[in-house]
Image: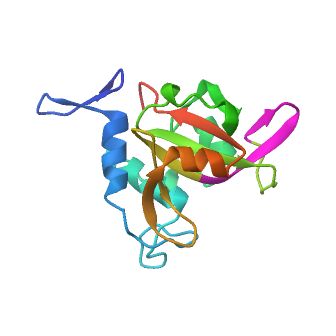
Amino acid sequence: MLVGNLLFNPLGYSKDIGKEFVENARKYLGVNYEWGGRLTATNPKIDCLGLLFLAYSETFDFNWEELSVYPNKLVKSGKLGDPIKGLDGILCENVDITKLKGGDIIYLLSTNEINDEPLTNIEGINYWPWHTGIYSGENLFLEARPGLKVIERSFDEVLEENIAIFVTRFKDSH
């Protein structure tokens, strides 16, 4: 049961949702990247959405196959949290990392159009996500890095390499 940001289990103790989500995602560190990967027989590796979906499934005991692979629909569904005011479409040079919490979902944005509605518009320019990951706390970013594997690295590096981000945080109830 979810109350506030705490997940209560039948034994009576609670866990922070963001922390549990990060812990579940870290289980996949070192798994090789492959587009469409979901650690299934037909897709035995993992991609960026696969990392989010699998950690979400473990955290909330939810079937990841019910989540949309279209970022705009995914954000609108609220399944991976609500947009964070002030971080819901912001240029990387303006990001205040003190507003981030472990477990926040980070959508890395570009102006390259994908087969979906733009996720946000910043200063009159449309942005679409090209990659996703998890802010894992202490200025770290957890991701299934394209062409490599699931890694954790400095969020400062991520901000330096990208134009803009969009952030969601788990809401109080599912």
- Asked if 152 appears above or below 20 in the picture, the reply is below
Give the magenta range.
119-131
Could you tell me what secondary structure mostly forms the magenta stretch?
Answer: strand
Camera-side residue: 68 or 33? Answer: 33
Quarter of the image with the C terminus is top left
Residue positioned 31% across, 58% down in the render: 27
Camera-side residue: 29 or 120? Answer: 29
- Asked if 154 appears above or below 139 in the picture, the reply is below
Please, which residue is most extreme toward the bottom here?
Answer: 42
Please, which residue is most extreme toward the left here?
Answer: 11
Quarter of the image with the N terminus is top left
Q: Quadrant of residue 168?
A: top right
Where is residue 83? Give x, y as percent.
59, 30
Q: Quadrant of residue 167?
A: top right
- Decide if residue 61 is in sight here: no
Residue positioned 51% across, 71% down in the render: 148
Magenta stretch encompasses residue 34: no
